Amino acid sequence: MDKKAGWGTAVAVVAFLAAMTVVFFYLKDRELYIGHVILHNTRAVAGLLLEISVLIITIVTNAISLKHISDEKERKKMKISVIAVSVILVFMLGFTCWILIDDVEDSRKATIAETDIGEGQSLLLVEKEEHFSTSGDSFYEITVYCREGLRLKKIGRQTEYYFLHDNMVRNGQYRVERDGDTVKVFYDYGELTNGLKWKEEYSDAPPEYIEKEYSLK
């Protein structure tokens, strides 16, 4: 490998490390929302980018090196090593994609509603069916996210297990209001079920909505 090829490899590696550093800090402690899909495993996303980058760098740098190797045996060795590394990376890519496909399927089963709350942010209410591990019974639960660009921050969770309306998000039985650095969600529960009763102060006039406040910070 001549000096030009060596410098090209060094520049590619430095650029790659810089890009991965940016990606790491961008994805840190966040989930992603891309095309109506919530990607919970951001490490898998980072891993996918890493594997694709390493595969491209491996192929490009070795293609450059092959141009400067005249010995046929050396060329053959390098080709074999490139193929071996590429096969391993492709296998890793397949495994990472399988992890991300699980997130795609999970999002397809959920009801996702998005509300613009200003300042470049929006609120995501993600309603999906959960199952008790012991009895096998199911209930619906809402996960509340604050969205900025592609990044999601989980800010709350609300179960629908005890109430009449199990699909409040799907049925649009809620409203959202922002108040500074907090957001209020008013859940329209309707009547209680399973023998539950309102507290004494609400027994004569049950509230139409139950209010929950979530911090955006």
Image (cartoon, grey):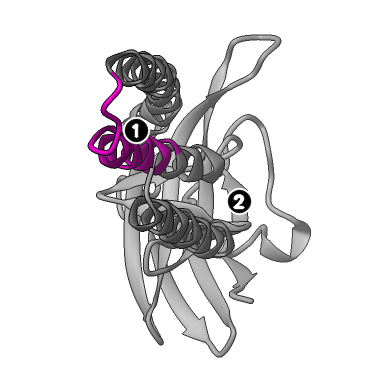
Q: Depth check: give the residue in front, 170 or 32.
A: 32
Q: Which residues are magenta?
A: 51-71
Question: Can residue 11 be seen by looking at this rendering?
Answer: yes
Q: Which mark is residue 157?
A: 2
Side of 183 where 70 appears, left or right? left
The quarter holding residue 30 reads bottom right
Question: Can residue 208 be seen by looking at this rendering?
Answer: no
Quarter the C terminus occupies: bottom right
**Other-residue count near label 2 (Cα within 10 Å), few / some / many at <14 / 14–19 / ≥20:** some
> Three-letter amino acid code at disc 2?
Arg
Q: Depth check: give the residue in front, 180 or 147.
A: 147
Q: Earlier in the sequence, mark 1 or mark 2?
A: 1
Is residue 62 magenta-colored?
A: yes
Give the answer, above or below, for where 187 lies relative to 61. Answer: below
Is residue 17 magenta-colored?
A: no
Q: Position of residue 48 (x, y in %)?
A: 42, 38
Q: Which residue is mark 1?
A: 104
> Three-letter amino acid code at disc 1?
Val
